[in-house]
Image (spheres, grey):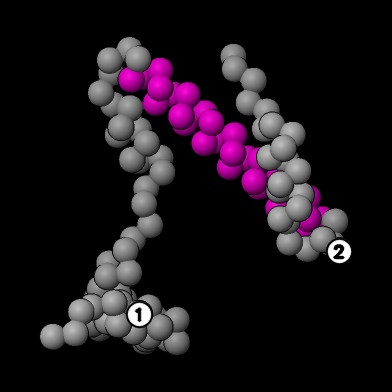
Amino acid sequence: MTDITPPPELVQQWKRTAPHQSNKHEHYHYITLCAAQWGAEQELEACCELLQQKGIPAWSLLRLHRRPKPPSLKEQALALIDDCTDPEGDYLDDNALSIIRCALEALPND
């Protein structure tokens, strides 16, 4: 089994960039989350590399399904509009309106 221990330099970086310096619980919680995410990324990359070395084409699907990309601004805006056109859908709150506005502003002027 491979040792998945973050390098000391990375741990120091997490300590420096962690919010809540005055609240030890929040501070350590942030560092713990960073370490867990880093370890998960290392494990995923090791699995993908092994599958690729063995000639198993599923390695790209593994990465795609385990680390899906967040929806684009356009996809978010369309989903919000779809939700609001449903008779039982929610109303557009300020966050929804902001997403739709950003998506529209990103469109080229015609």
Q: Position of residue 100 (x, y in %)?
A: 32, 81
Q: Amino acid at mark 1?
A: Cys
**Residue, x 13% and y 85% (percent of image)?**
110
Nearest the eye: 7 or 48: 7
Tell me: residue 90, above or below residue 45. below
Q: Amino acid at mark 2?
A: Ser
Which image quarter: residue 18? bottom right
Q: Where is mark 2, residue-wise?
A: 22
Q: Regarding mark 1 in the picture, which secondary structure is present there?
A: helix
Q: Magenta segment, principal secondary structure?
A: helix
Report the side of 38 relative to 97 (left or right): right
Which image quarter: residue 56? top left
Read off the magenta span: 25-52
**Residue, x 30% and y 32% (percent of image)?**
60
Please tell me the numbered disc located at residue 6: none
Q: Is residue 94 highlighted in magenta?
A: no
Q: Where is mark 1, residue-wise?
A: 102
Nearest the eye: 21 or 78: 21
